[in-house]
Amino acid sequence: MSGTSVDAIDSALVRCRDNRVEILATHQHTIPPKYKQQIAAISHSGPDEIERMGILDRELGRLFAEATLQLLEGAGINSRQVEAIGSHGQTIRHRPPSATQHKRDSFTLQIGDPNTIAELTGITTVADFRRRDVAAGGEGAPLAPAFHAAAFAEPGVNRAIVNIGGIANATILVGCELRMGFDTGPGNTLLDHWIYRHRGESYDRDGAWSACGQVNQSLLERLMKHPYFQQQGPRSTGKEAFNLAWLDGHLEGFPDISPEDVQATLLCLTADSIALAIKSTALEIPEVYVCGGGSHNIRLMEKLAAQLAPAKLASTVELGIDPDWVEAATFAWLASRTLKGLKGNSEVVTGAVGARVLGGVYWGGSQASG
């Protein structure tokens, strides 16, 4: 899994049994700066896009294969013992139906060539999970709620699972029923890009820099007027909507604001938009469990706890899965379902016309029959 934050490749060795997962080993693989720069560049329109995308697609395929092989080496596992790789790939465009004027113009695109992964590892690779859901009229995201329901639902208990990656998403579970799921808006993406611009740091450790600033309420109110926050029902978003260019446009009206005050305000934007999305369900949600990189941001967790009180706020570690590895486990689980011909999407989450088996299968090994 490489998410919208592009901070690293998270790989997990997972055993799937009876719709549950057991994480056996994990590995975080560095993404070299040159690839981060190329991913950022290709995520926006520019010259020679097809040429640059084709080359980067293969390079990321090699990088994902390398991450897989290092994971297996560290775990002492032979590639022949692995049934499949579930590769999310790297999203470079996400234009869901909810963000397009005409539904037929919607699309989502992830790169990281699965042919290359399968060739270099010898392991069958399942990839391209999102586009079948879009073809069926869905948002293509978020896909994690179906896994959240399988892994974290409990009879008689209402709870929300919140993943705070680059973009944040929430899953609403009413007992064992997956009632709804949606992207809530920016997670870490604006916080990470802003601190990198001003301090050259990839993320705000523990939210320490944001704690040095003061929230600018006028700026926060302006940012919260983004139309996405008023949407209801199946919805998803990405860096196309929430990016530094969008932020810079709003900052033109605040010429004297300090960088740390902006960071403090962005942190509140993330917390407030997550809380707003959960509260807008009008359901009683007494438990909220957080996963993803944002779960380590102490300041963000404090703000979110205050906004959601009296609900309990905790990490998914209390439910048995380390918050850093929930997304990687999600795509292992989805790959397992694909190979069994089972649905991977949820219509109540993405708005697709029906359940679909997600992903394409790229067979491993060098032998072919027939």
Image (cartoon, helix red, strand yellow):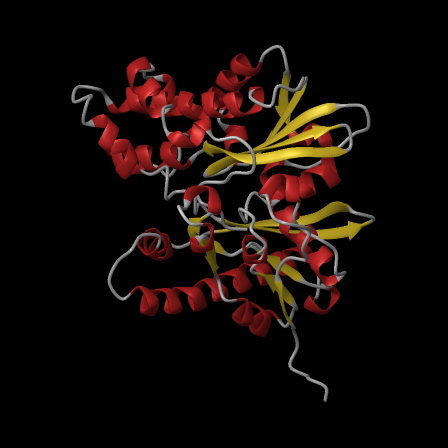
> Residue 125, image x and y in percent?
62, 65
Q: Farthest residue in the bottom direction?
A: 370
| Quadrant location of the C terminus in the rendered image | bottom right
Name the image quarter holding residue 71. bottom right
Confirm whether residue 286 shows in the render: yes
Q: Farthest residue in the front direction?
A: 102
Q: Compared with residue 33, is residue 123 higher up or lower down, i.e. above or below? A: below
Q: Front-most of 277 and 294?
A: 277
> Residue 23, image x and y in percent?
71, 46
Name the image quarter holding residue 53. bottom left
Q: Compared with residue 225, is residue 243 higher up or lower down, i.e. above or below? A: below
Q: Front-most of 118 and 225?
A: 225
Q: Residue at x 45, y 33 (%)?
A: 185
Count of labels in the image? 0
272 relative position to 334: left or right? left
Q: Compared with residue 301, is residue 360 higher up or lower down, i.e. above or below? A: below
Q: Residue at x 82, y 28 (%)?
A: 155
> Residue 327, image x and y in percent?
60, 44
Q: Front-most of 224 and 135?
A: 135
Q: Residue at x 72, y 86 (%)?
A: 369
